[in-house]
């Protein structure tokens, strides 16, 4: 439990409620070790078993939870704590009444998975407990709390990114012509276990390793392929340190790169830089994506079949505004504005005969534009050098 960080984020949550149309934000959950509630690490910092409610208003907040969890909540020192034994109903109603909360934002959202932790069963229970309240989705509040990073969060993401990049360079230094995709992954997993790092997504697929032009593009398991002469080693990788994730893609070529490979890399970099230049406070998600696609079209290249970028924080895909095309699968997430102190990836690639020319950078949105979290890859790196 990180009490100082929870205090930072709860203060931010109060401001977000004050800026919203809701009177309060209610996070309602139970058995979070089994069914994860994505917002709980921000506003409470520990798992619960009994039905639990965190009620956040513009100036104060209350947590209503089972008596056995109450001492941990008291130790946190952030919320008023209301423990219960038999029923959560009365203390929950009292907490909302104290805020004069008629319109209550609750943890569901149509498009943002990290704002959609409320199960249908718990929603039905909440309706029974509070039949006289108007419920609205808390997506906008969650986007503020999760997306706009504090200085502590920026430092932790940067550390995770620097660690990820260091491990990637170390793996490349260990490479030999006989090294397989699986051995690259095993090396990185071994280093992660030694240091106690988690993976930024599913362990089996993090890292994703592609060796040469015969490798299938996408989230694939590493196999026994090695890197042929003049072809690519592509790695998509991220570690989690101190609760915060990184997400980077890097490339190496074995030997002298063919001219066509160099040209493909340059075109990928140009599209990433185009998105980078478009990304600034107030930019709309789909317009940033469109700018990168326009650069590829101008260079007569095929377009990628995913969003240009997503937010990064406690997980590799951190919800909120998405830098993606106006496709049905992305819903309204691509219609939102980019804001200062959010963190995004910018990622795309080209499938070539020499392998997948995939690049993924992490960027921080500043008052004036954006800046790279770690040094970008601006040239093809050589294996064995």
Image (cartoon, grey):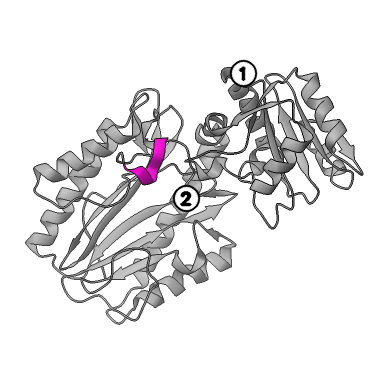
In the rendered view, tell whether residue 254 sits above or below residue 271. Answer: below
Horizontal side of residue 284 vs 74, given as left or right: left
Q: Magenta includes 306?
A: no
Residue 322 horizontal/vertical position (percent) = 39, 39
Which mark is in front, 1 or 2? 1
Q: Which residue is mark 2?
A: 316
- Magenta residues span 327-332
Query: Residue at coordinates 31% horizontally, 32% vertically from top-left?
Result: 279
Instruction: Please tell me in which quadrant of the rendered image residue 271 appears.
Output: top left
In the rendered view, tell whether residue 209 sits above or below residue 271. Answer: below
- Give the SS element for disc 1: helix
| Residue 374 in sight | no
* 150 and 177: which is toward the camera: 150
Residue 211 horizontal/vertical position (percent) = 28, 72
Residue 264 horizontal/vertical position (percent) = 14, 55
Which mark is first along the chain, 2 or 1? 1
Q: How many marks?
A: 2
Horizontal side of residue 27 vs 158, given as left or right: right
| Magenta segment main secondary structure | helix
Horizontal side of residue 263 vs 184, given as left or right: left
Q: Which residue is mark 1?
A: 18
Q: CA distance from mark 1 to mark 2?
A: 28 Å
Residue 215 horizontal/vertical position (percent) = 27, 72
| Mark 2, other Cα within 10 Å: few <14 / some 14–19 / many ≥20 | many
Query: Residue at coordinates 81% horizontally, 48% vertically from top-left?
Result: 50
Instruction: Please tell me in which quadrant of the rendered image residue 289 appears.
Output: top left
Which quadrant is home to the N terminus? top right
Horizontal side of residue 227 vs 99, given as left or right: left
Which quadrant is home to the C terminus? bottom left
| Residue 111 in sight | yes
Instruction: Please tell me in which quadrant of the rendered image residue 298 appears.
Output: top left
| Mark 1, other Cα within 10 Å: few <14 / some 14–19 / many ≥20 | some
């Amino acid at each position: 439990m990180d009490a100082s960080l929870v205090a930072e984020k709860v203060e931010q949550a109060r401001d977000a409620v004050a800026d919203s149309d809701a009177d309060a934000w209610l996070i309602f959950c139970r058995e979070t070790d089994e069914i994860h509630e994505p917002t709980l690490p921000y506003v409470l910092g520990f798992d619960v078993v009994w039905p639990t409610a965190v009620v956040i208003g513009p100036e104060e907040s209350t947590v209503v939870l089972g008596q056995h969890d109450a001492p941990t909540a008291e130790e946190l020192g952030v919320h008023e704590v209301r423990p219960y034994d038999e029923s959560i109903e009365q203390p929950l109603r009292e907490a909302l009444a104290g805020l004069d909360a008629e319109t209550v934002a609750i943890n569901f959202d149509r498009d943002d998975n990290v704002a959609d932790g409320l199960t249908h069963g718990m929603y039905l229970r909440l309706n029974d407990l509070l039949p006289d309240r108007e419920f609205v989705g808390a997506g906008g509040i969650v986007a503020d709390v999760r997306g706009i990073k504090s200085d502590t969060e920026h430092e932790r993401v940067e550390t995770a990114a620097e660690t990820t990049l260091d491990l990637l360079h170390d793996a490349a230094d260990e490479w030999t012509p006989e090294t397989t995709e699986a051995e690259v992954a095993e090396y990185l997993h071994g280093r992660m276990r030694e240091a106690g790092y988690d993976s930024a997504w599913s362990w089996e697929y993090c890292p994703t390793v592609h060796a040469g032009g015969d490798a299938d593009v996408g989230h694939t398991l590493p196999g026994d392929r090695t890197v042929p002469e003049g072809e690519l080693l592509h790695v998509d990788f991220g570690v989690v340190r101190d609760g915060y994730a990184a997400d980077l893609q890097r490339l190496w070529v074995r030997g002298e790169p063919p001219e066509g490979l160099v040209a493909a890399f340059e075109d990928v970099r140009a599209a990433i830089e185009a998105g980078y230049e478009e990304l600034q406070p107030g930019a709309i998600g789909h317009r940033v994506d469109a700018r990168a696609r326009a650069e590829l079209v101008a260079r007569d290249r095929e377009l990628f079949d995913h969003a240009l970028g997503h937010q990064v924080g406690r997980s590799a895909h951190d919800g909120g505004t998405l830098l993606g095309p106006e496709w049905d699968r992305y819903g309204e997430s691509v219609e939102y504005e980019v804001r200062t102190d959010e963190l995004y990836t910018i990622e795309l690639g080209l499938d070539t005969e020499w392998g997948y020319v995939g690049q993924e950078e992490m960027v921080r949105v500043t008052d004036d534009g954006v800046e790279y979290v770690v040094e970008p890859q601006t040239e093809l790196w050589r294996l064995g050098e």
